[in-house]
């Protein structure tokens, strides 16, 4: 798995995002390109904006026990994998707004660097290692950028 905290890898991801247009079509799935960009930002929302309440109690326990390995592990996501309801984007979104928001998150993550994330608590999965944060961010972005052919 590529390290999203590496500047070269981050720049590759940014270049892929900048290849997208409002007319980009998915090769699978139901989201349009603006919804996909908004969906990719959800992982960063919890880190930077506290936009969603953190998982607590039994739900957090279940996420750490059953979902964490899938989200932060090295194995890529399968096409058409189910998305948790709180991560679904079903309303209409503005392509340019969502693209800029995701790019801002990637730039902020790069500026902070990996050391900022090593051991940092995830809202849903508990404390994560540097590699787990990188896998979670990169794998999700790569999955959806591949979905849109970039």
Image: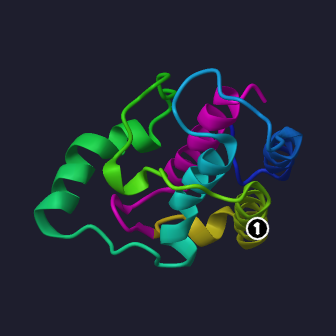
Main secondary structure found in the magenta portion: helix
Magenta residues (range): 121-150
Residue 26 position in % (x across, y down) = 65, 28
Q: How crowded is mark 1: few (under 14 residues within 10 Å), some or many (20 or more)?
A: few
Numbered disc 1: secondary structure: helix
In the image, 22: left or right of 31?
A: right
Q: Is the image coloured rainbow, by chain, by secondary structure, or in one colour?
A: rainbow
Q: Residue at x 58, y 55 (%)?
A: 92
In this rendering, the count of numbered labels is: 1
Q: Quadrant of residue 57?
A: bottom left
Residue 37 position in % (x across, y down) = 65, 50
Q: Which residue is drawn at 72% across and 54% down?
A: 5
Residue 2 position in % (x across, y down) = 68, 37
Above or below for 101 versus 81: below
The reply to whether residue 51 is visible in this rendering is yes
Q: Residue at x 33, y 61 (%)?
A: 124
Residue wearing tag 1: 104
- The stretch drawn in magenta includes residue 118: no
Above or below for 45 versus 102: below
- The stretch drawn in magenta includes residue 146: yes
The reply to whether residue 1 is visible in this rendering is no
Q: Nearer the viewer, residue 63 or 117?
A: 63
For the view shown, which residue lies furthest in the front direction? 92
Residue 34 position in % (x across, y down) = 67, 50
Q: Which residue is drawn at 51% across and 55% down?
A: 91
Q: In which quarter of the image is residue 93?
A: bottom right
Q: Which of the image's four quarters has the N terminus?
A: top right
Q: In which quarter of the image is residue 111?
A: bottom right
Above or below for 122 versus 66: below
């Amino acid at each position: 798995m590529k390290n999203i905290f590496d500047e070269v890898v981050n720049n590759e991801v940014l270049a892929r995002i900048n290849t997208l247009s409002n007319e980009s079509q998915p090769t699978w799935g139901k989201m349009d390109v603006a919804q996909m960009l908004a969906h990719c930002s959800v992982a960063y929302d919890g880190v930077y904006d506290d936009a969603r309440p953190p998982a607590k109690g039994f739900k957090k326990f279940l996420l750490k026990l059953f979902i964490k390995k899938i989200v932060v592990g090295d194995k890529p996501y399968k096409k058409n994998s189910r998305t948790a309801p709180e991560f679904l984007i079903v309303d209409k979104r503005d392509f340019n707004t969502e693209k800029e928001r995701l790019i801002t998150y990637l730039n902020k993550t790069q500026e902070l660097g990996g050391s900022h994330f090593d051991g940092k608590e995830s809202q849903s999965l508990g404390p994560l290692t540097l590699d787990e944060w990188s896998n979670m961010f990169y794998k999700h972005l790569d999955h959806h950028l591949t979905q849109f052919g970039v």
